[in-house]
Amino acid sequence: MAQNDTLIKGWQPVIGLEVHVQLMTNTKLFSPAKNQFGEDANTLVDLIDLGLPGVLPVLNEGAMKQGIKFGLATNAKIAETMIFDRKNYFYPDLPKGYQITQLHYPIVRDGVVEVNGKKIRIHQAHLEEDAGKSIHDKYDDKSVIDLNRSGVPLLEIVSEPDIRSASEAVEYLKKIHQIITYLDISDGNMSQGSMRCDANVSIMKPEDKEFGTRAEIKNINSFKFVEKAINFEIRRQIKILEANGAVEQETRLYDSIKDETRSMRTKEFANDYRYFPCPDLVPTNISEEFIESVRKDMDELPEEKQERFMSTYNLNEYDAGVICADKQIANFFEEVVKDADIQLAAKWIIGDLNALLNKHDICLDESKIDAANFSELIQKITDNTISGKIAKEVLEEIWITGTKVTEVIDSKGMQQISDEGELENIIETILNENNNQVIAYKSGKDKLFGFFVGQVMKATQGKANPGLVNELLKKRLS
Amino acid sequence: MNFKEQRENYRLKKISAKEAVQESLVKIKNDKLNIFINHFEKQALANAEHIDNNFNDFKDKPLSGIPIAHKDIFCTEGLPTTCGSKMLENFIAPYDSTVVKNCLDAGSIMVAKTNMDEFAMGSSNETSYFGAVANPWNHDLVPGGSSGGAAACVSANITTISTGTDTGGSIRQPAALCGITGLKPTYGLVSRWGMIAFCSSMDQAGPFAKDAFGCAALLDAMASFDEKDSTSTKREDINFEKSLSKDFGTLKIGVIKNIQKLGISEDVINAYENSKTVLSGLGHKLVEVDFSELSSGICSYYVIAPAECSSNLSRFDGVKYGYRSKGEKDIANLYMNTRSDGFGAEVKKRILIGTHVLSAGFYDAYYLQAQKVRRMIKVKFENFFKDVDLIFMPTTLDQAFEKNRKSDDPNRMYKEDLLTIPANLAGLPAISFPNGFKNNLPIAGQLIGKYFGEDLLLNTTNKIQGVTDWHKMTP
């Protein structure tokens, strides 16, 4: 099973990820309180989230549908009957003293995703409630608790230990991110904690039959840190084993400032969570009809969208793939091409727009670019109002200010000069000023044609219609 | 006076709700049996006036103008709900339980909340933080538990109806020891929303009254499908009071084979035999059923109930509400000392047992085995009910016992529930009614019915009470 290209100093890393995804539902998993981020502390809290005596949970069907969508998107088995369990432990931000989760009968099991042509199996995905938040740094003498997050629905996606390198782990995580955002079941925002990741890491010799002892790294909150934390952990374990030591089964925390993992608790002190079926929730049967109704309601998946873009918009596989990698961009593309040229729009999105997004490391909806304005930009290129070169300047401008394309062009006088008389006059002047070159060109130095075009563009500050300049020059010089 | 007469008097305007409430309040204030944890004079009188002022709106409601006492396990908005524990001594719930709300809507007036075993764990009402309750028939004896206060309240004629909860017999056993009628409904008939959980998979609220009639009217008020309780069952509405006069024809009633082997007292057996004669006299056919697995129910129960309670009571940690120990330097000490001081001995014992049986390495041996036994008993009942309409057996092994009973057997108290637990394990409805009197104390029998067969249970008990007088005796 070992792949030689992933060996590090002769050791084979073996990695499994547990990804917690906060689901975007209207209300919490078991209470009618609103599920939102960024509200004032303890304002999104129902009797149920407080764990008051006598309260009872009621399952949010919306969260169940989202779990099923994920299962369908990963070709997984959807449970005929799912059962919620209680995971018992004491913590101040866990009001009931137990978390309701799914242990033996999760909503989804045996899924698979493909990362760079390799299949990575998903062991299961289960529904559970999030805990509240303990805040230790607000006051000197006390810790406080915010229960807004208490009861927010999570889908925990547990992979099989099929991942063989830190970079593959990141690719897998990006794939999961793509699926959940495509399904619109989560915003997948890692910095706000709506997607969090635990990594199980062990190493073995390629010839070993059994995996090594694993360490679990908890709560990693960015793609970058996933890669760094896993790589640190692999190096740490190699160092231990090469010194004839033994890796301890333990839970570790990643410190992104020091770029290291540190022991949190060893197996000896591992919690006994005393799981048992939650008696307040009856086993939930999920019928074929229900699953079909969810399937009908499902948004298009990345691969489906890519194929559709290839057939509908006649894009090549590569272009369609790049555009469909991000759902926001794919939707943006479809808006833009309602009025603009398809191939040109694709070229500009894949090229200049993507470059700007990457350079500033933001996603499209965080930028000032909207589809209608971008479409206008493409149309202005197509109808020769502006040249491609000028269009780049306009794009830079609307990226910064968000101003309408037409306003930018008007206010800066960027319109392309397509008036034949005007261009003929300019050409005439330039040819007169460069008599020697004209003679040289006519005696066979064809390359000088470009020189004349450049001079015209220079004289018009790039606004001359290049096609027309070519045509007129050829006519004048023939 | 029983419930039926009291309601009739109100409907005929012979007595106002306010007068009825005042009568109950006088008795509550004079109570020497420690039946109540709190009473609510101001709120009760205001409520009674509201009902009197809107006589026409309330007169046809099942509980019109009736003072009622609720077991202190039901949350009441703005008023204390202690669950018999120091942990919740000063706890005021911000919401009403569905049972309390249903009873209010049905025209009753809550006058007080009754004493109970702490968190409903006990069979004698002696585990209450607020002290033991005396049995109205003999003040040196216990009233049973855990709904001991609720049963004593009706037995002592303070109110004509009261609510209780039954997890392993907590309605039927005190009803038996206090000489009144009490019904544990089918699991899922009455909403558990706002009822403080002990063992969620068995807890079920039900009515106390002198007779089947009062229980039927109170159950009409209590039962409802509740979206807030996922274990609540949607079913066609049955009017229990009306079903009392329905003719169910000749019934086949299962009676227990070799019942003398279960360690039941001679007096209780005699009363049981007597009742069999009564049932035959009413035209019913008695058939013996072999229920030799009955005793194993108790083993299953005392694994599952502590397991669930250990989890249900985790929320009482001193962080959010309820008792909190003072001056703790860290969270671990806050948890330990809050829970050590806030819970009584019996509750702590069950939390420890429950924690143990769910622990890694013990779960399969205890919890899973107990669930198997539970399923076996359920199947046993299902097989019985292929042949019979009802099952009849005594409610308790013996009559009311003395407070602080000494025993060499540490499980003696748990055996109190031997005959009541099977119905809880299976989720079946069962009714206990007085069926004898000896040593100046009541004796009781119970009928167990099919799922949602409360109408037949109440109807049959009502017919028995039409030809016997045990339920009319008062202390």
Image (cartoon, coloured by chain):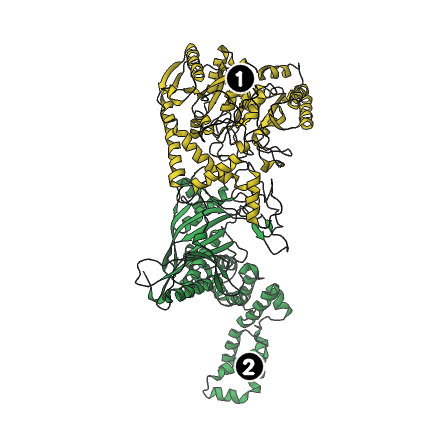
Chain colours: A green, B yellow
Dot 1: within a 10 Å radius of its alpha carbon, few (fewer than 14), some, or many (20 or more) residues? Answer: many
For discs 2 and 1, the disc positioned in front in the rendered view: 1
Element under label 2?
Answer: helix
Residue A417's x, y, as percent?
58, 73
Report the front residue among B391 and A37: B391
**Whole-percent x, y for residue A148 in the image:** 58, 48
**Residue A303 visible in the displayed image:** yes
Q: Is residue B233 above or below residue A123?
A: above
Classify residue A426 by image quadrant.
bottom right
Q: Residue A278: x and y, percent? A: 46, 39
Residue B450: give x, y in percent of width and height: 42, 24
Q: Is residue A87 above or below residue A368?
A: above
Q: Which residue is mark 1?
A: B211
Left or right relative to B84: residue A247: left
The three-letter code of the residue at mark 1 reads Asp
Camera-side residue of B45 and A362: B45
Secondary element type, mark 1: loop
- Residue that numbered label 2 is attached to: A455
Taking A122 as reference, is A314 above or below it? Answer: below
The chain ID associated with circle 2 is: A
